Image (cartoon, rainbow, N blue to C red):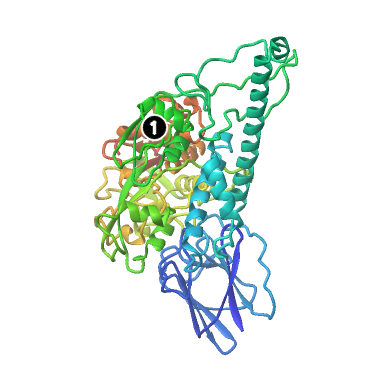
Amino acid sequence: MYAIRVTSPDGHSSLQPFNGPVVTIGRLAENTVPIDGTGVSGRHCQFEIAGNVVTLTDRGSTNGTFINSVRLTQPVQVTEGVEVWVGSFKLELTTMHAGPVSNAAPVQAPPVATGPLLASASGDRQWRDMHGRMQRIAEKWDSAGRPTHLGLRRGELAAARRWLAAPEDRALPVTRVQRELIEASAAGASKALVKTIILAGVAFVVLAGGVAAAIMFWPESTPDPTPTAGADATGGGSTGDTGEDDDDDDDDDDDDDGGVRPPRPKPRLPGVEHTVIPEETFEDIARRYSVTTKEIANWNAISKDDPLSEGDVLKIDAPITSPLPQTMINYEVEPGEEAWSTLATRFNVSPTRLKAYNAAEFPDTPKAGNRIKVWIDPTPYRRSKDTREIPPIVARLDAIAKGNPNNGSLENGIQMPDSPNYIRRQPRRMWANAVLVSNLQRAIAAFRRDIAWEGELVLADISKKGGGHFRPHASHQAGRDIDIWLPTLRGVFKAKYLDEAGNKEWGRRPEPEEVDWFAAYGLIEALAETGAVHVVFLDKHLFDTVRRAGRGMGATEEEVEKIFKRNGGVLDHSAAHIHHIHVRFKCAKYEKPSCKNNSTVH
């Protein structure tokens, strides 16, 4: 009996037996094997068995079905051992054997963004909701470098331990980073308890009259009075209400005099105002800004036990971190997505919270065509430690740009090749010179390697085959200019946005609130690092958002400013470029003097 082994991007695998002559694969729940992830279409592909022959057919998917890096263009016969790639999922035909089936070893996905686990239609919903919450907390903790102050508080830690001890929904295994978060939080709680006991002991010695003994072991230096993550704005310094460990420095070396080193104060940022969203708690807000719930209560003259309501504005007077604002998008429900759990999986949010966001308009289940509210908390990406070199990408050097971008032509143009790393919106409008083809592919490959963004990157207009005037653009005439849609937050993109759901010329491009600005910063940075980009155009009203995203990704103020054109970088202003970036590549030496870099027309 045949089966399909489906391996998700994190290496978790599952066997799906043939229960009929046809097995369909895709994102929609109607499929025999529903999988939800980057690059997976609603009805992606199918396996059909006739006797001992199994045929694989692509069902018109947007991003294609690949065998050994070759995209299917017609039905093909497949045998055991052949690797089929659907987005970032690996599918293999295999034979079912009696007895237990062991999980496959983790695999290296092709250079596309990684997606979530296999969609699950069973299991305890409360356990799965907690799984989603733990994963979001764990990913934020991990991406920030695993600081103590982003670990679980005491109440959350107790709930997490109960969740961990419960039977697992096998389609959603406990991840390594979830376990490590719980273990690290438990260790931090123990460390905090030891510190409390030590301080209590010191207090007892002082009260008993042993002042000299207490002074002997106290550091000579006085800690900086600046409030830390564990101190309230009045200098109280108590964190017993949250169980936080204020000092995430694990260096326990003593001072020269044998004393205990005081905790290092954490730098504070300018104050901000936070608008409460549905279902948000004091703990959620404290974690966003790396402060304590007691500090928030003191800054706003309220009790941390007071209920919060949607729209409440809280002052965060001295945050340690300053994340991008949470953003609300309006999403049109598609056929097959009517279940809250399906929508929650799409956006990686809790079904309970998603229902709460929409309780007034949709007390029950939404219907296809309804527009629901989804609140998304953008999270910075932790840069990959993958240091592998991007292999050289060589294009025909006879593809030459001539003249200016706004008054030029293209000789022997190259059509931008297909790739699982991106989507070509309209290939017939994507002819380029060698510089653009080779360096753009290299930049996108580096972006995919370094930033764990899971979305679809849409490449749009470059030039006509021979260049020249290219409506509706003023430039794009020499094969050196390309429009790239700004990368979107998880769940926003739909394949139909490429054409039928938007403007005939532009498609349905993302709105600024739908953009994943952390990914956008990573993409601009990758383009700049090629050294082949002349300029990247974006509306200046979005520059501050780019700056904040860069800082959130760990870049220094100096590093962030270096990406701007006025500081020797590439990012420059062009009005109304709020849905996409316009990237212009430099002329190659062998294209000069006929190729000109001096045009400022966008």
- The image shows residue 387 at horizontal and vertical percentages of 63, 43
- The image shows residue 86 at horizontal and vertical percentages of 51, 65
Q: Is residue 476 visible?
A: no
The foreground one among 407 and 214 is 214
- Residue in the picture at 49% in, 32% down: 290
User: Extreme bottom residue here?
Assistant: 51
Q: Is residue 293 left or right of residue 104?
A: left
The foreground one among 374 and 151 is 151
The foreground one among 264 and 299 is 299
- The image shows residue 144 at horizontal and vertical percentages of 54, 37
Classify 364 as above or below 155: below
The quarter of the displayed image where residue 26 is located: bottom left
- Residue in the picture at 64% in, 23% down: 199
Classify 275 as above or below 472: above
Q: Secondary structure at mark 1?
A: loop
Of the 4 image quadrants, the one containing the N terminus is bottom right
Mark 1 surroundings within 10 Å by alpha-carbon count, few (fewer than 14), some (14 through 19), many (20 or more): few
Q: Is residue 421 left or right of residue 3?
A: left
- Residue in the picture at 32% in, 51% down: 357
Q: Is residue 509 left or right of residue 155?
A: left
Q: Is residue 58 visible?
A: yes
Of the 4 image quadrants, the one containing the C terminus is top left
The foreground one among 51 and 155 is 155
- The image shows residue 597 at horizontal and vertical percentages of 38, 34
Query: As shown in the figure, which amino acid type bears the numbered disc 1?
Result: Ser
The quarter of the displayed image where residue 245 is located: top right
State how many labels appear.
1
Classify 82 as above or below 233: below
Q: Read off the residue under disc 1.
A: 303
